[in-house]
Protein backbone atom coordinates (compact mmCIF):
# COMPACT_ATOMS: atom_id res chain seq x y z
CA UNK A 1 0.00 0.00 0.00
CA UNK A 2 1.32 3.38 -0.98
CA UNK A 3 0.66 6.31 1.30
CA UNK A 4 0.07 9.50 -0.64
CA UNK A 5 2.08 12.38 0.75
CA UNK A 6 -0.42 15.14 0.13
CA UNK A 7 -1.96 17.84 2.26
CA UNK A 8 -5.65 18.58 1.92
CA UNK A 9 -7.52 21.76 2.78
CA UNK A 10 -10.23 21.40 5.38
CA UNK A 11 -13.85 21.80 4.32
CA UNK A 12 -15.59 25.14 4.79
CA UNK A 13 -17.06 25.74 8.27
CA UNK A 14 -20.67 25.91 6.98
CA UNK A 15 -20.28 22.58 5.18
CA UNK A 16 -18.72 21.09 8.31
CA UNK A 17 -21.54 22.36 10.57
CA UNK A 18 -24.14 20.99 8.16
CA UNK A 19 -22.43 17.60 8.15
CA UNK A 20 -22.04 17.54 11.92
CA UNK A 21 -25.73 18.35 12.33
CA UNK A 22 -26.37 14.77 11.16
CA UNK A 23 -24.17 13.32 13.90
CA UNK A 24 -26.62 12.71 16.73
CA UNK A 25 -25.28 13.39 20.21
CA UNK A 26 -26.41 13.42 23.81
CA UNK A 27 -27.34 16.86 25.15
CA UNK A 28 -25.49 17.91 28.30
CA UNK A 29 -25.24 20.90 30.58
CA UNK A 30 -21.67 21.36 31.75
CA UNK A 31 -21.38 23.28 35.03
CA UNK A 32 -18.80 24.66 37.42
CA UNK A 33 -18.73 26.95 40.42
CA UNK A 34 -16.67 30.14 40.52
CA UNK A 35 -16.36 32.71 43.31
CA UNK A 36 -19.08 34.73 41.51
CA UNK A 37 -21.48 31.79 41.50
CA UNK A 38 -22.47 28.87 39.25
CA UNK A 39 -21.73 28.78 35.51
CA UNK A 40 -23.02 26.41 32.86
CA UNK A 41 -23.51 25.86 29.16
CA UNK A 42 -25.20 23.35 26.86
CA UNK A 43 -22.84 20.96 25.07
CA UNK A 44 -23.09 18.01 22.75
CA UNK A 45 -19.29 17.74 22.36
CA UNK A 46 -18.85 15.33 25.28
CA UNK A 47 -17.53 11.78 25.18
CA UNK A 48 -15.83 9.01 27.11
CA UNK A 49 -12.04 8.87 26.88
CA UNK A 50 -11.05 5.97 29.16
CA UNK A 51 -12.46 3.79 31.91
CA UNK A 52 -9.08 3.40 33.64
CA UNK A 53 -8.81 6.00 34.98
CA UNK A 54 -12.42 7.06 34.39
CA UNK A 55 -12.02 10.07 32.11
CA UNK A 56 -14.29 12.05 29.80
CA UNK A 57 -13.89 15.14 27.69
CA UNK A 58 -16.05 18.18 27.09
CA UNK A 59 -15.46 21.07 24.70
CA UNK A 60 -16.18 24.75 25.38
CA UNK A 61 -16.01 27.62 22.92
CA UNK A 62 -13.33 30.07 24.08
CA UNK A 63 -15.63 32.98 23.08
CA UNK A 64 -18.36 31.76 25.46
CA UNK A 65 -19.32 34.04 28.34
CA UNK A 66 -18.68 30.99 30.58
CA UNK A 67 -15.14 30.44 29.37
CA UNK A 68 -13.28 32.50 32.03
CA UNK A 69 -15.01 30.54 34.82
CA UNK A 70 -14.11 27.19 33.21
CA UNK A 71 -10.59 28.37 32.43
CA UNK A 72 -10.04 28.93 36.16
CA UNK A 73 -12.02 25.91 37.38
CA UNK A 74 -10.50 22.81 38.95
CA UNK A 75 -13.82 20.89 38.89
CA UNK A 76 -16.75 20.61 36.51
CA UNK A 77 -19.85 18.46 36.12
CA UNK A 78 -21.36 16.98 32.95
CA UNK A 79 -25.13 16.65 33.40
CA UNK A 80 -26.66 14.46 30.67
CA UNK A 81 -30.18 15.60 29.91
CA UNK A 82 -33.27 13.43 29.77
CA UNK A 83 -36.58 13.66 27.95
CA UNK A 84 -38.37 16.84 29.06
CA UNK A 85 -35.20 18.93 29.47
CA UNK A 86 -35.50 20.69 26.10
CA UNK A 87 -36.31 24.10 27.62
CA UNK A 88 -33.40 23.79 30.05
CA UNK A 89 -31.07 22.95 27.17
CA UNK A 90 -32.24 26.01 25.25
CA UNK A 91 -31.86 28.22 28.33
CA UNK A 92 -28.25 27.16 28.93
CA UNK A 93 -27.47 27.31 25.21
CA UNK A 94 -28.70 30.87 24.75
CA UNK A 95 -27.83 34.34 25.94
CA UNK A 96 -29.75 34.19 29.22
CA UNK A 97 -27.76 35.82 32.05
CA UNK A 98 -25.93 33.21 34.10
CA UNK A 99 -27.76 33.65 37.44
CA UNK A 100 -31.13 33.27 35.68
CA UNK A 101 -30.11 29.96 34.09
CA UNK A 102 -29.88 28.26 37.46
CA UNK A 103 -33.37 29.43 38.51
CA UNK A 104 -34.76 26.68 36.24
CA UNK A 105 -34.24 23.04 37.09
CA UNK A 106 -33.43 21.58 40.48
CA UNK A 107 -29.73 22.00 41.25
CA UNK A 108 -27.73 20.37 44.03
CA UNK A 109 -24.19 21.10 45.11
CA UNK A 110 -22.05 18.11 44.19
CA UNK A 111 -19.18 16.79 46.27
CA UNK A 112 -16.78 18.93 44.18
CA UNK A 113 -18.95 22.03 44.61
CA UNK A 114 -20.06 21.97 40.96
CA UNK A 115 -23.82 22.24 40.32
CA UNK A 116 -25.50 18.85 39.70
CA UNK A 117 -28.88 18.68 37.99
CA UNK A 118 -31.04 16.61 40.36
CA UNK A 119 -33.06 14.86 37.65
CA UNK A 120 -30.35 14.49 35.00
CA UNK A 121 -30.14 11.12 33.29
CA UNK A 122 -26.62 10.89 34.71
CA UNK A 123 -24.17 13.44 36.14
CA UNK A 124 -20.39 13.06 36.07
CA UNK A 125 -18.44 15.21 38.52
CA UNK A 126 -14.91 15.68 37.26
CA UNK A 127 -11.56 17.02 38.34
CA UNK A 128 -9.76 18.75 35.49
CA UNK A 129 -6.86 16.55 34.38
CA UNK A 130 -5.77 18.31 31.17
CA UNK A 131 -6.95 21.01 28.82
CA UNK A 132 -5.81 22.12 25.40
CA UNK A 133 -6.98 24.47 22.70
CA UNK A 134 -8.01 23.35 19.23
CA UNK A 135 -9.51 25.81 16.77
CA UNK A 136 -12.16 27.90 18.51
CA UNK A 137 -12.56 25.54 21.47
CA UNK A 138 -10.83 24.30 24.59
CA UNK A 139 -10.98 20.56 25.23
CA UNK A 140 -11.38 19.75 28.94
CA UNK A 141 -10.32 16.29 30.10
CA UNK A 142 -11.93 15.40 33.40
CA UNK A 143 -11.20 12.53 35.76
CA UNK A 144 -14.57 11.34 37.00
CA UNK A 145 -14.70 11.51 40.80
CA UNK A 146 -18.42 10.93 41.32
CA UNK A 147 -21.43 9.72 39.32
CA UNK A 148 -25.09 10.30 40.10
CA UNK A 149 -27.63 8.31 38.06
CA UNK A 150 -31.38 8.73 37.95
CA UNK A 151 -34.05 6.13 37.26
CA UNK A 152 -34.93 7.93 34.04
CA UNK A 153 -34.25 6.05 30.82
CA UNK A 154 -35.08 8.41 27.94
CA UNK A 155 -32.03 10.40 26.85
CA UNK A 156 -32.32 13.76 25.11
CA UNK A 157 -30.34 13.76 21.86
CA UNK A 158 -29.74 16.45 19.26
CA UNK A 159 -29.69 15.45 15.59
CA UNK A 160 -30.53 17.25 12.35
CA UNK A 161 -30.92 20.49 14.34
CA UNK A 162 -33.73 19.20 16.51
CA UNK A 163 -34.23 17.29 19.74
CA UNK A 164 -34.80 13.56 19.58
CA UNK A 165 -35.62 11.24 22.49
CA UNK A 166 -33.89 7.88 22.72
CA UNK A 167 -34.46 4.96 25.06
CA UNK A 168 -38.12 5.32 25.93
CA UNK A 169 -39.58 2.06 27.10
CA UNK A 170 -42.10 0.55 24.72
CA UNK A 171 -45.70 0.68 25.93
CA UNK A 172 -46.88 -2.52 27.64
Image: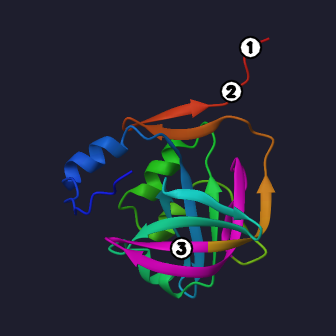
Name which of mark 1 and mark 3 comes first in the sequence.
Answer: 3
**Mark 1 residue crowding within 10 angstroms, few (<14) / some (14–19) / many (20+):** few
- Of 131 and 120, nearer the camera is 131
Question: Which residue shows up at 28% across the image and 57% down it?
Answer: 4
User: 37 left or right of 62?
Assistant: right
- Looking at the rendering, in which quadrant would you find the C terminus? top right
Specify start and end residues of the magenta stretch as a single range. Answer: 114-141
Q: Position of residue 110 (x, y in %)?
A: 75, 71
Callout 3 touching callout 2 (CB < 8 Å)? no
CA gap between label 1 and label 3 equals 39 Å
- Of 124 and 14, nearer the camera is 14
User: 15 left or right of 76?
Assistant: left
Q: Which residue is mark 3?
A: 140
Is residue 57 visible in the rendered structure shown here? Answer: yes
Q: Which circle marks residue 168 in the picture?
A: 2
Count of labels in the image: 3
Q: Position of residue 49 (x, y in %)?
A: 63, 63
Question: Which residue shows up at 48% across the image and 72% down it?
Answer: 139
Callout 1 touching callout 2 (CB < 8 Å)? no
Magenta-colored segment: predominant secondary structure: strand
CA gap between label 3 and label 2 equals 31 Å
Q: Which secondary structure lies at badge 3?
A: strand
**Mark 2 residue crowding within 10 angstroms, few (<14) / some (14–19) / many (20+):** few
User: 8 left or right of 161?
Assistant: left
Q: Which circle marks residue 171 in the picture?
A: 1
- Judged by depth in the image, the label closer to the viewer, 3 or 2, is 3
Amino acid sequence: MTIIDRRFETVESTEFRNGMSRLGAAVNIVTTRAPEGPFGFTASAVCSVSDTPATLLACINRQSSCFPAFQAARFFCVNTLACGHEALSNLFGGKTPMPERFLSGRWLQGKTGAPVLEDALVSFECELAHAFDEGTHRVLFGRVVDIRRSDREAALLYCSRRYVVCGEAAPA
